[in-house]
Image: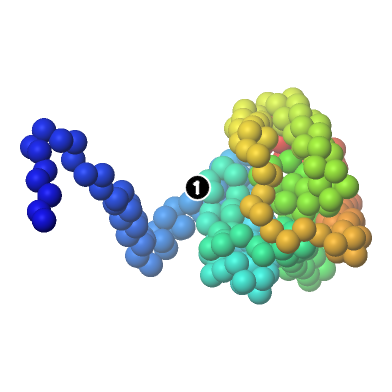
């Protein structure tokens, strides 16, 4: 028996057509945009802080992000690649979220810890040339990684300390996020910066408006919680030591130098 379809009937529902995937960027395009982004970042830092700080910051960003890439690939969240973001720094991409919160903590801490290796050439140049100014490059690298451990999105500190706080109570992470973000915004705004407070504020808003602070993953065990907290504290200490040694060795005013990292005057 043949079913007669009226010409006035509503059309049969059609399955939605999946969107066509975006064509991948060619290696040449990736290289061109990466080079332009790097030059813009270096030029902007040089304009505000001088050429030595610009060289140290860009080199430090690459080493920092390479640390993330190594652990992302090890954790099964790769392949990863480095992206330079003009005026802000860099980012390491992930193909998929980590399977466990502990792997997420390790990925977040890998950048600041591995990134400290970038300070070694500047300490070496200071010893070889007898010119202590080179150590200010080591200070820049230590300071960048230290500030990156602040638990405010999108910094690594929020991804490392967030699961640790949430393991105690989910609201603790959100309260700490709001407090630290408010302090970070107030501090950077007091330095005359507009971009960084806006960037942090939007990131905090985007994090809090979602039901989850991060993709679902295997939660921390109490042993992993203790290990993650110890690793976070160790990373803070190492970054502080490198930044302090670089500042004292080069004669940089520590408070004034950290003020410049507000990206203002």
Tag 1: Cα neighbours inside 10 Å, few (<14), some, or many (≥20)? some
Q: How many marks?
A: 1
Q: Nearer the viewer, residue 69 or 170?
A: 170
**In the rendered view, does 115 fall on the left or right side of 1?**
right
The answer to whether one can see residue 262 in this image is yes
- Please identify the quarter of the rendering in which residue 80 is found: bottom right
Q: Residue furthest front?
A: 1
Name the residue located 67 percent from the left edge and 49 percent from the top edge.
214
- Please identify the quarter of the rendering in which residue 72 is found: bottom right
Name the residue located 78 percent from the left edge and 48 percent from the top edge.
162
Secondary structure under tag 1 reads helix
Q: Nearer the viewer, residue 11 or 140?
A: 11
Task: Give the vertical position of 191 relative to 246 (above or below).
Answer: above
Q: Nearer the viewer, residue 252 or 217?
A: 217
Badge 1 is on which residue? 40
- Please identify the quarter of the rendering in which residue 249 is found: bottom right
Quarter of the image with the N terminus in it: bottom left
Q: Position of residue 176 (x, y in %)?
A: 82, 37
Name the residue located 90 percent from the left edge and 60 percent from the top edge.
222
The answer to whether one can see residue 55 in this image is no
């Amino acid at each position: 028996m043949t079913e007669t379809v009226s010409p006035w009937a509503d059309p049969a529902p059609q399955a939605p057509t999946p969107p066509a995937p975006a064509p991948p960027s060619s290696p040449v395009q990736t290289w061109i945009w990466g080079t332009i982004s790097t030059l813009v970042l270096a030029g902007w830092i040089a304009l505000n802080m001088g050429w030595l700080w610009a060289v140290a910051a860009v080199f430090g960003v690459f080493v920092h992000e390479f640390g993330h890439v190594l652990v992302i690939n090890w954790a099964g969240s790769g392949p990863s690649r480095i992206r330079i973001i003009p005026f802000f720094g860099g980012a390491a991409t992930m193909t998929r979220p980590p399977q466990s919160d502990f792997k997420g903590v390790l990925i977040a801490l890998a950048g600041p810890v591995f990134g400290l290796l970038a300070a070694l050439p500047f300490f070496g140049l200071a010893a070889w040339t007898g010119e202590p100014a080179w150590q200010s490059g080591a200070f820049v690298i230590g300071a960048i990684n230290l500030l990156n451990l602040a638990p405010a999105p999108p910094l690594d500190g929020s991804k490392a300390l967030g699961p640790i706080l949430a393991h105690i109570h989910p609201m603790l992470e959100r309260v700490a996020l709001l407090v630290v973000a408010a302090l970070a915004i107030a501090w950077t705004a007091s330095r005359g910066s507009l971009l960084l407070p806006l960037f942090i504020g939007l990131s905090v808003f985007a994090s809090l408006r979602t039901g989850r602070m991060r993709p679902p993953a295997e939660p921390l065990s109490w042993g992993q919680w203790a290990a993650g907290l110890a690793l976070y504290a160790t990373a803070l200490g190492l970054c502080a030591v490198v930044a302090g040694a670089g500042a004292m060795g080069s004669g940089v005013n520590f408070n004034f130098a950290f003020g410049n990292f507000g990206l203002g005057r």
